[in-house]
Amino acid sequence: MKEQLGFLIDFSRCSGCFACMVACQDEKDLPDSISFRHVVKLEKGRYPLVKFSFITLSCLHCGDAPCIIVCPTGAIRKRDEDGIVVVDQNLCIGCHSCALACPFGAPQYPDGKKMDKCDFCLKRIEAGLEPACVRICPTRAINFGPIEKLEREVAEKASRTILGSR
């Protein structure tokens, strides 16, 4: 594999605006009830000292993806060139095995029959663009790229924070 692509989410920056979900729905022409990205609201504390935080999640394109393992038709595969887990709609039989196996709720059934999910907006990235959710995020909480590069950036930011040089 050339390089595994992935998302890096800075949860401290997510404001819970749901723009990423709307961008996903728009890009993929999904109905209002379906999105390949979800925003979860977490509450901590008790009134009047309540703190809210948000987590934005989508398919993680797992290294050892359980959805691939359980798919009886081989409709789900990981691309060799970038590690993106994709679905062949012609092979999917809509059995929901992948949805049962995925601990993150990534598989969705927009047409009610065949599974689809986040593919990092494959057409956009093949055109040299960012995924729609990354492009639209007003707080830049969602980052995208080769995982090794994202890991280096996190390590560098942590080092600067620890050393106090921000």
Image (spheres, rainbow, N blue to C red):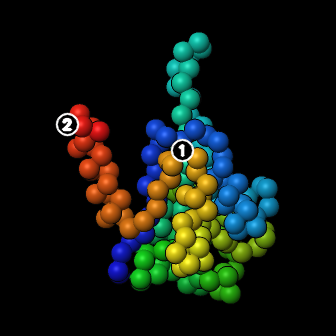
Farthest residue toward the front? 165
Q: Which residue is mark 1?
A: 139
Q: Is 81 situated above or below 50?
A: below
Residue at image location 31% in from the left, 64% down from the top = 148
Q: Nearer the viewer, residue 147 or 75?
A: 147
* Quarter of the view holding residue 15: top right
Residue at image location 61% in from the left, 40% down from the top = 16
Tell me the SS state at disc 2.
helix
* Quarter of the view holding residue 121: bottom right
Can you tell which mark lies on residue 58?
Answer: none
Q: Is 142 situated above or below 65?
A: above
Q: Nearer the viewer, residue 77 or 165?
A: 165
Q: Quadrant of the C terminus?
A: top left
Farthest residue toward the left? 163
Q: At label 2, which amino acid type do we have?
A: Leu
Q: Which residue is mark 2?
A: 163
Residue 146 is situated, as x and y percent measured from the top left of the image, at 38, 68
Which of the two discs, 2 and 1, labels the residue nearer the N terminus? 1
Q: At label 1, which amino acid type do we have?
A: Thr
